[in-house]
Amino acid sequence: MTEPGADPVVDAVVDVRAADWRGAVHAACAPLVSSGALEPRYPERCIAIAEEHGPYMVLAPGIALAHARPEDGVLRLCLSAAVLSAPVEFGHDQNDPVDVVLAFGSPDDSAHLALLQSLAEHLLEGLADQLRLAPDRATAVRALSAVRPPSE
Amino acid sequence: MSPAPNRPLTVLTVCGVGMGSSLILKMNAEKALQSLGVEAKVEHTDVSSARGMKADVAIAQGLHADDLGSVAPVVLAISNFMDVDGLRRQLDEALRAQGWLS
């Protein structure tokens, strides 16, 4: 369990080949599932929510943020990104196609507030392009690691 | 047209889950409202909870906007959650149309 103020688990994958948006969601969640921050059912919940409500996770042109609720299998606060080698369609009328799929999970209703605030700031400052241009996984992880709640 | 509420506007940002997209939208709505000089209290929630709530303005993705007609007199459909300038323009136009901003 995450204690208050604990650092989020951050990871990324680059040059990902995804057959479709479902594959892209799985790819974005995969490193967080591997590290034990998310249960394997979490990406399935993200996909089920999108199937029920439409492409809620598509935030901006080319950018999606996969997420579900704490009870959908979040063990630790976490954030990841998958940069796709070829963009996929999420079925969004204006923001398709998507080539940067972020994923986050929060273990409760408030642990993620500061993290997402920081994520929004970094996206406004060009984080998605930094991820797209990252030549390797380590560079992408470094770019994404800049997103963190301000330390107390 | 209705008179400007004599209190901060209540604004609700809505997404499918109520955790992520709606929270980012809340932050950017706060920025946009501040730049318009509009005093507002912004909350975020999921679309199912939103249906039972009341606000002056509801902001959501287009795919949820049709569901929110009973929630607020002003419903804005947003496609790019990161476009603060675009959101400011939409709010400016909608609040002027209501007579809440002059």
Image (cartoon, rainbow, N blue to C red):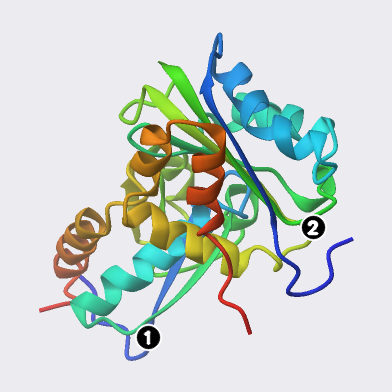
Check the image and name the residue furthest to the left.
B102
> Which dot marks residue A69?
none
Observer able to see residue B58: no
Looking at the image, which is closer to me, B32 or A14?
Answer: A14
Is B25 drawn above or below residue A56 in the view shown?
Answer: below
Check the image and name the residue furthest to the right.
A1
| Numbered disc 1: secondary structure | loop
Q: Quadrant of the C terminus of chain A?
A: bottom right
On the rendered structure, is B43 left or right of B3? Answer: right
- Please state the horizontal and vertical placement of residue B43, each as a whole percent of the image: 52, 70
> Which dot marks residue A107?
2
| Numbered disc 2: secondary structure | loop
- Label 1 belongs to which residue? B8
The residue positioned 23% from the left and 81% from the top of the image is B3
Q: Quadrant of residue B49?
A: bottom right
Mark 2 burial class by Cα count in 10 Å: few <14, some 14-19, many 20+ = many
How many badges with numbers are in the image?
2
The residue positioned 39% from the left and 48% from the top of the image is A127
- Please state the horizontal and vertical placement of residue A107, each as a whole percent of the image: 79, 57
The residue positioned 84% from the left and 71% from the top of the image is A3
Is A80 drawn above or below residue B31 in the view shown?
Answer: above
Observer able to see residue A73: yes
- Please state the horizontal and vertical placement of residue B57, each as a whole percent of the image: 37, 65
Q: Is label 1 or label 2 in front?
A: 2
Instruction: Say which amino acid is labelled 1.
Output: Pro
Q: Chain of mark 2?
A: A
Q: Chain of mark 1?
A: B
